[in-house]
Amino acid sequence: MKKWVIGNWKLQGSRSFLRSYFAEFAESAQASAEKFLAGGVQLAICPPASYLSEAVSVIADLSEPWSERVLIGAQNIAEYGEGAYTGEVAADMVKDCGAAIALVGHSERRQLFGETDAQVAQKMRQAFAAELVPVLCVGESLQERESERTLLIIEQQLKQACANLSSDQWARLVIAYEPVWAIGTGLTATPEQAQEVHAFIRAQCAQMQSRSVVRVPLLYGGSVKGGNAQSLLTQVDVDGVLVGGASLKASEFAQILAASWG
Ligand code: PGA
């Protein structure tokens, strides 16, 4: 199955950063160009919403094989469609800017902006309706892990967001397991810890899918770096990585891409 490598820039970047970043990325990733062209890896970057259109046009200007093959994604979408919701950005608008994917329920949204499971479910519906690929983020806090509630929390988050998905929607979904204690902290889940939760998510997905079971790409996120990506990506149920801090360094992101071929 195709591996996914997604960069999440969070609230960082600028128009000039976009241009210099992708120029450096294309150069650093040159050794991976042939493999990338042959397929096998889906690459995406999620810049702040204000730079979505600019990112799409910068990518269109890149040399082959990167041109138009690197997907652009939103870090968040509104739970509503168009209307009187000051400050929000609708899934349709994100799509209209050329984005193909959207992170949904990132732990920073849940923790810092109080996003609930019900809102996450609503955002999933908006993403599907706009024909975006939702990257549903789930994960436990340190306290939840220490009190051995990791799997329970993950199960709740999955059930709230994925109840009643159609088989078409299952076929388009991506899930990222991001333990909250590993995000931006420098603490990474061990490959075994990641694999254990990924296998659980895989089993939960199979249970929720009524008819034919599709293999949902399961990404790991939380302090992924050039140096640890490969050991995570070689786990049987780790189909990709969602990278925050390290995705802002073009050469390190290129290193993570190279690690995705093993
Ligand atoms: P990090 O962030 O790689 O900086 O830990 C991951 C994420 O928040 O998606």
Image (tube, rainbow, N blue to C red):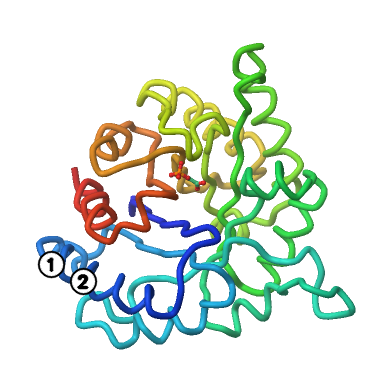
In the image, residue 96 sits, relative to residue 121, either above or below, namely below
Q: Amino acid at mark 2?
A: Ala
Picture quarter with the C terminus: top left
In the image, residue 193 sits, relative to residue 185, either above or below, namely above
Picture coordinates of residue 151, whole percent (x, y): 62, 22
In this view, the residue farthest toward the left is: 31
On screen, residue 135 versus residue 68, left or right, reads right
Q: Residue at 38% of width from left, 75% of height from top?
A: 18
The residue nearer to you, when weighing 260 against 215, is 260
**Residue 26, numbered circle:** 2
Picture coordinates of residue 98, whole percent (x, y): 52, 82
Q: Residue at 52% of width from left, 38% of height from top?
A: 177
On screen, residue 44 versus residue 35, left or right, reads right
Q: Is mark 1 within 8 Å of ligand 1?
A: no
Classify residue 74 by image quadrant: bottom right
Picture coordinates of residue 153, whole percent (x, y): 69, 27
Task: Classify mark 1: helix, strand or loop.
Answer: helix
In this view, the residue farthest toward the top is: 147
In the image, residue 30 sits, relative to residue 63, either above or below, namely above
In the image, residue 186 sits, relative to residue 163, either above or below, namely above
1 and 2 marks in contact (CB < 8 Å): yes
Q: Amino acid at mark 1?
A: Gln
Task: Classify mark 2: helix, strand or loop.
Answer: helix
Q: Residue at 70% of width from left, 71% of height from top?
A: 129
On screen, residue 91 versus residue 231, left or right, reads right
What residue did someone put label 1 on?
30
